[in-house]
Image (tube, rainbow, N blue to C red):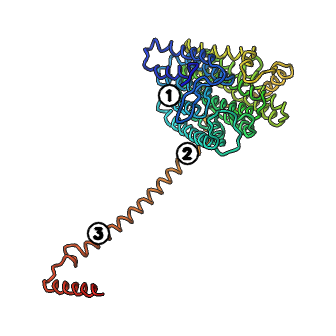
Amino acid sequence: MTASVLPPAIVLIIGGLVLPMLPVRLRGFTILAMPLVTLFLVWQVPDGAALRMPFLGYELTLVKGDALSRLFATVFAVMAFAGGLFALNQNRVVELAAAFCYAGSAIGVVFAGDLISLFIFWELMAIASTLVVWSAGPSARGPGLRYAAIHLLGGVLLMAGIAGEVASTGSLALGKLELDSLSRGLILAGFLINAGAWPLSSWLPDAYPESSWSGMVFLSAFTTKAAVYVLLRCFPGTELLIYVGLFMVFYGIVYAILENDMRRILAYSIVNQVGFMVTGIGIGTELALNGAAAHAFTHIIYKALLLMSAGSVLYMTGKRKCTDLGGLFRTMPLTTICGIVGALSISSFPLTSGFVSKSMISDAAGIQRLEMVWYLLAAASAGVFLHAGIKFPWFVFFQKDSGLRPADPPWNMRAAMVLCAALCIGIGVLPGPLYAILPYPVTYVPYTPSHVVFYLQLLLFSGLAFFLMLDWLKRTLTITLDVDWLYRRLGLALAQNLNRAAETAWNGVMGSAERAARGVSSGIQRYHGPDGILARTWPTGAMAFWMTIMLAAYLILSYL
């Protein structure tokens, strides 16, 4: 093994494994210290390969740094710190241990320098995130099992693609791939499953909202953004991703508008926002790729803020449906303010982080004269304001008076929300530090008069449409059907019918075999039983006669 740095991922992975064995007083310090140490190590990784080791005749590059890797590793470490601070009073230690192993595996993915190293950390990430879901209790077992099944399918596709790639090229290099072979198509499919691309998007709103009030904060940050990272690394400029991304954008908007569960609203908005990033990757210019990377960075923070505010409501009230909530601004003012900051950020409101990142993607589409893509992204931005920018805070914190009077959550949860809110506003006001660490040089200026006025008009009319259609958008106790119905209900029904058919066929075969066996048994009984012809006593003379006949036949045959 050749190494020049300590792998940043190792701190969170080992720390997560050790966490359950630590005393309670030391556990809180460790939860906050590990991400900070990891963040320091992230910025010690130089450009190029920093850790190599031999494996089955190949040389693995476990750590390889560049601007793109450091960008994603930085925000993953920041998110691990904010999520750990928010979860300090979480008494499920297994969840915390799995969450930090999950974060460490995601950092391992972004620093992996070859396909096998990537796959190892990819699967560790799937296992750890499944444990985070399952840690919520019995109600999360079914969703967690479906989550694991989908991600194991993605892992199988990815491994098959990697095996085909290595067999055809003899190289493990992790770099730009042209979509020109079956193996590379399988690799892309494995990445897109983790990104939440349709038709296998429904694992995300199925599993994430069933995790605990703190677990979903971690879950929102790593799996889909690690997928965005590998798409940026391997498939920039792949035109197919434009259409995949646009479908994700509108799919997430439609289902989020239909939802009544506040955490499922935010889960569908993850799919929507990742769709913007995937579209930017498909456009493939430097501005679009910078926009996708920057939007992944800002999305992790503002989505965590939104989920922290939703998690705080769940923690203090035990309720998650919009129809059960409302009027919480009276007694949860800090949570309300932080939720509004997150809502404005996801809506790309000027002076928030979403404005300085998402606009890079739409402007890249305009520069490339992709008019339809630009119009669709603009319409989608208005849709985001409808479902996450207004709907979530309005129905949770305002609208009717639900009669609930919970206080703001404990200090650590408030501190985590304030930290994320400060980052959302700070990046929005001063985007320069974020632009400085993007993978390509940035000359983009977000705050031009035309740009600001356009987005303000877009958001103003979207907000007006919300209140004009408020009677239509009021939530009721409904159930929305998604693609997961095919394997949760239809698939189950088909499996039960197939099981009954197989059972009937098996019973028929066994019945036939039993009847045949009885026939053979009765035949044997007929000839060899106590009264059978072969069991009767024969006279001695008859026996001597037949022996003479047999000897005569033998003599005749011997002379022929």
Marks 2 & 3, CB-CB < 8 Å contact: no
Residue 486 seen from this side: yes
Which kind of residue does numbered mark 3 sit on? Ser
Image quadrant where one finds the C terminus: bottom left
Q: Nearer the viewer, mark 2 or mark 3?
A: 3
Marks 1 & 3, CB-CB < 8 Å contact: no
Which numbered disc flags the more N-terminal residue, 2 or 3?
A: 2
| Drawn side of residue 242 relative to residue 172, left or right | right
- Furthest residue in direction right, as rendered: 450
Which numbered disc flags the more N-terminal residue, 1 or 2?
A: 1
- According to the picture, the residue beneath numbered tag 3 turns out to be 521
| Drawn side of residue 31 relative to residue 79, left or right | left
Q: In which quarter of the image is residue 266?
A: top right
Which sits in the foreground, 513 or 225?
225
Disc 1/disc 3 C-alpha distance (Å)? 59 Å
Rendered residue at 50%/14% (across/down)? 30
- According to the picture, the residue beneath numbered tag 1 turns out to be 136
Relative image position of residue 505 (x, y in whole percent): 45, 60
Relative image position of residue 342 (x, y in whole percent): 68, 21
Which sits in the foreground, 84 or 485?
84
Which kind of residue does numbered mark 1 sit on? Ala
